[in-house]
Image (spheres, rainbow, N blue to C red):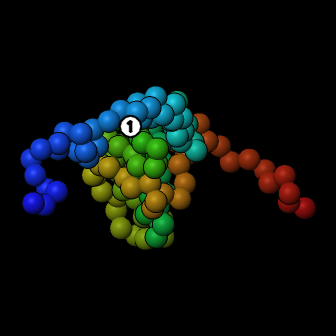
Amino acid sequence: MSGRGGRGGASRGRGGGNAGGAAAAGDKKRRESILNLQQYVDTSIRIKFMGGREVTGTLKGFDQLMNLVMDDVVEEYENDARPPRSLGLVVLRGPNIVLISPTDGSAEIENPFGA
C-alpha cells in the first residue's frame, strides 16, 4: 500500500499548525508611507505626472504606494494649447506621479542659490 491513504492525514496536513506563527505575525511593524498625505485629505492639490500631464482636484484617499483617489479632477496640459477637461472621480497611480503640491498653500520664492 502507498503512504497516501486517508489515515493520519490530519497529523501531517499542510498549513494547519500555529506553533508561534500568530505571535510572529503580530510583531510585524506596519510599513509607513514616505510622505504623509493625511493632512491634505479633502483639500485641493495639484499633481504632475511623467509626460507633462497635470491634474488638480480634491484628495479623497491614498495608500502606501502613493496611489491617490481624487474627486472633481480637472486635467491640464503643461506645454499644449488643449483646453482643460473635467475627469470627475479618478484613481491616480503612484509610480507615475512626479510632484504633489497643495493648490492654495504654495507660493513662488526667491532662489536662495541665485547670484
- Say which quadrant the C terminus sits in: bottom right
Please give the residue where the numbered disc 1 appears in the rendered image.
61
Q: Position of residue 79 (x, y in %)?
A: 48, 70
Give the residue type that dot 1 points to.
Gly
Q: Residue furthest right?
A: 115
| Residue 72 in sight in this render | no
Q: What residue lies at 61% left-to-right and 42% top-to-bottom? A: 106
Q: Is residue 29 above or below residue 4?
A: above
Nearer the observer, 22 or 20: 20
The answer to whether 92 appears left or right of 23 in the picture is left
Q: Nearer the viewer, residue 88 or 31?
A: 31
Camera-side residue: 40 or 61? Answer: 61
Is 98 rendered above or below residue 37?
Answer: below
Q: Is residue 25 above or below residue 4?
A: above
Q: Position of residue 25 (x, y in %)?
A: 44, 34
Is 61 rendered above or below residue 92? above
- Measuring 53% from the left and 49% from the top, which residue is drawn there? 100
- For the N terminus, the quadrant is bottom left
Q: Which quarter of the figure has residue 89?
A: top left
10 Å neighbourhood of mark 1: few (<14), some, or many (≥20)? Answer: some
Question: In terms of secondary structure, where does tag 1 sit?
Answer: strand
Q: Which residue lies most toward the front here?
A: 1
Q: Residue at x 40, y 33 (%)?
A: 19
Q: Position of residue 49 (x, y in %)?
A: 47, 61
* Residue 29 visible in the snapshot: yes
Say whether residue 39 is left or right of residue 13: right
Q: Residue at x 14, y 56 (%)?
A: 4
